[in-house]
Amino acid sequence: MALAGIRVIELAGLAPAPFCGMILSDFGAKVIRVDRTKASMTVDVQSRGKQSVALDLKKPEGAAVLKRLCVESDVLIEPFRNGVMEKLGLGPNEILKDNPRLIYARLTGFGQSGSYAKAAGHDINYVAMSGLLSMLGRHNENPYAPLNLLADFAGGGLICAMGIVLALLERVKSGQGQVIDTSMVEGAAYVGSFLWKSQNLGLWNRSRGENMLDSGAPFYETYKTADGKYMAVGAIEPQFYEELIKGLDLDSSQLPLQMSFSDWPELKRIFTETFASKTQAEWSKIFDGTDACVTPVLSLDEVSSHPHNRERGSFIVDAQGDISPRPAPLLSRTPAMPCLSGGPLIGEHTDLVLAEYGYSKDEIAKLQSSGIIECNKTKSRL
Ligand SMILES: C[C@H](CCC[C@H](C)C(=O)SCCNC(=O)CCNC(=O)[C@H](O)C(C)(C)COP(=O)(O)OP(=O)(O)OC[C@H]1O[C@@H](n2cnc3c(N)ncnc32)[C@H](O)[C@@H]1OP(=O)(O)O)[C@H]1CC[C@H]2[C@@H]3[C@H](O)C[C@@H]4C[C@H](O)CC[C@]4(C)[C@H]3C[C@H](O)[C@]12C
């Protein structure tokens, strides 16, 4: 796998850092998640393939263990607010001193500087600060956050993983590590670059929810079907729009022009009425194999059995029978091979990992008896 041989230490976080760690693990890195001691259960649902070490970083001996792990590792991912790592004596200056080749990846909402750097926040706040949230939502409604996808995952975990891979690549030339400052505000904004760059194309001249791609246009919308499901329509270009009209069995000479903004509400009404006349399966049969850009809106339960996704093996089933997306993208020679057994229990690999990093049995026993580390004796699943 592409990242085989890369050792990653991931300090346990909420959602973005676990995603970043999972990407690296899926593509072959060995990822060790550092959990808190005295934690009953982990909330990391993106932990496949990872190992877990339970370590009390608030104790100097615990911080020393992390430092030692970092000496022999390639990447550290830390998901805390600005200043937390420094307070623990684990800031980049201290850590990189002992291992200048380390990639020290910081993944926060507001970044390492600026007046919000130390503020708490969640995805919705970061998307709001990126400018993107102001553009999301239907006409005459409040801005709407699209789950926690844009900042936590697209602008956060994924962008951080890209930064890590770039830094690893650069290290081949320079032999040097570096600090990565991932701000989810900036990551989300960057993902949305098109919105800034397309201002002059007239795509966003109207108010929120009245533009072509923000639910204003009848040909870029979802419609309810007779069985209470939905179809997604993305028939932008005239030749594809024509196919849409044909599939709906409408007469284009009786309809307003596609790009007549003032007629969009009326056109939407007609499409709504038409889509409501058949089931999702019936519409899929009509539109499959055409260029109308019409697809069923599939639920998470339905995606893996859709013929197209099934043919490509786009979803995987783990040992528990749970379905999830196969890692993307597909690399032709060195594809990701996600671990199909469940994620680790907290502290499941503490003694194993410490031994691998050169700790003697005695040292491990001492750390354990003083509560610096915890070892979960449950049989390893990895
Ligand atoms: C599913 C929910 C998650 C939703 C995601 C949400 C929408 C997001 O947006 S996630 C993105 C959040 N933002 C960031 O990550 C940006 C960077 N980070 C931060 O800004 C902050 O970390 C913070 C704001 C997110 C949290 O601030 P906090 O004050 O808590 O932490 P920090 O200031 O960063 O400091 C960390 C302190 O911890 C110490 N530490 C760290 N590691 C160790 C260690 N190993 N040993 C010792 N000490 C350690 C560190 O030193 C710092 O100490 P100080 O403060 O003294 O400096 C889920 C969200 C909540 C979940 C639910 C909840 O957990 C309750 C239940 C738990 C149960 O187990 C399962 C069910 C729950 C209901 C659970 C369910 C879900 O998982 C959640 C809803």
Image (tube, rainbow, N blue to C red):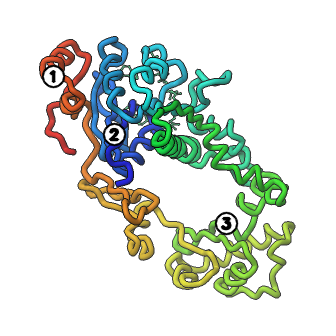
Q: Earlier in the sequence, mark 1 or mark 3?
A: 3
Rounded to the nearest angstrom, the CA distance separating label 2 from label 1 is 22 Å
In the picture of the structure, the residue carrying the numbered disc 2 is 31
What amino acid does circle 2 point to? Val
Q: Relative to 242, does residue 169 appear above or below in the rendering?
A: above
Residue drawn at point x = 73 percent, y = 52 percent: 195
Quadrant containing the C terminus in the rendered view: top left
CB at mark 3 closer than 8 A to ligand 1?
A: no
Residue drawn at point x = 37 percent, y = 60 percent: 335
User: Is the C-beta separation of discs 2 and 1 under 8 Å?
Assistant: no
**Mark 3 secondary-structure assignment:** strand
Give coordinates of residue 209: x percent, y percent: 75, 55
Mark in front: 3 vs 2? 2
| Residue 32 relative to residue 203: left or right | left
Q: Relative to 263, does residue 133 appear above or below in the rendering?
A: above
Give residue 360's mark. Answer: 1
- Label 2: few (<14), some (14–19) or many (≥20) C-alpha neighbours in 10 Å: many
Give residue 221's mark. Answer: 3
CB at mark 2 closer than 8 A to ligand 1?
A: no
Give coordinates of residue 132: x percent, y percent: 69, 45
Mark in front: 1 vs 3? 1
For the residue pair 334 and 236, the one nearer the viewer reads as 334
For the residue pair 302 and 131, the one nearer the viewer reads as 131
Mark in front: 2 vs 1? 1
Residue drawn at point x = 85 percent, y = 71 percent: 260
